[in-house]
Image: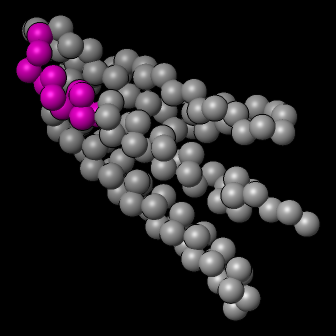
Amino acid sequence: MAITFDDALGIHPDALNFRVQRTKVLASNLANVDTPGYLARDLSFNTVMSGLNSASGHQKPEMQISAQYAVPYQNSTTGNTVELGVEQAKFTQNNMDFQTSLTFLNMKFSGLAKAIEGR
């Protein structure tokens, strides 16, 4: 019975890729915190992953990531929707989620290495 890396690693590489993409979007928001009229964006993990799960066929579907505009808690006079504290919290949470995904991926590789070695 043949096993592929996609089967062995599961969703973890996709989750890690999502976290990288979300980091870029959140960093862009933080960089533009003082830009008048800048609209904050964010990515939804559930939306992206449900798109991967709903695809059928033998080939792995390509991850479709599209940023959506974030709704601010408070309006600003400049039209900028980036809220520094909110974006910093999202960035920190995304970083912790990235580390968690990386840990799971490392555990998968470790298990595969043990299986190959026959332990």
Identify the image quadrant of residue 72. top left
Work out whether residue 60 or residue 2 is closer to the camera in this orientation and state it: 2
Residue 105 in the image, given as x and y percentages of width and height? 54, 63
Question: What segment is highlighted magenta in the picture?
Answer: 26-36
> Would you say residue 83 is visible in this rendering?
no
Residue 20 in the image, given as x and y percentages of width and height? 40, 43
> Would you say residue 25 is visible in this rendering?
yes
Q: Is residue 61 left or right of residue 13?
A: right
Residue 6 in the image, given as x and y percentages of width and height? 70, 53
Q: Is residue 77 left or right of residue 82?
A: left
Q: Where does the C terminus fall, quadrant-wise? A: bottom right
Residue 38 in the image, given as x and y percentages of width and height? 21, 13
Residue at the far bottom in the pictured view: 119
Q: Residue at x 18, y 31 (%)?
A: 30
Q: Residue at x 70, y 33 (%)?
A: 61
Q: Residue at x 57, y 45 (%)?
A: 14
Work out whether residue 102 or residue 117 is closer to the camera in this orientation and state it: 117
Work out whether residue 104 or residue 111 is closer to the camera in this orientation and state it: 111
In the image, residue 102 above or below residue 119:
above
Identify the image quadrant of residue 56. top right
In the image, residue 31 above or below residue 115:
above
Residue at the far front in the pictured view: 117
Does 27 appear in magenta? yes
Does 20 appear in magenta? no
Q: Residue at x 39, y 37 (%)?
A: 22
Q: Is residue 82 left or right of residue 41?
A: left
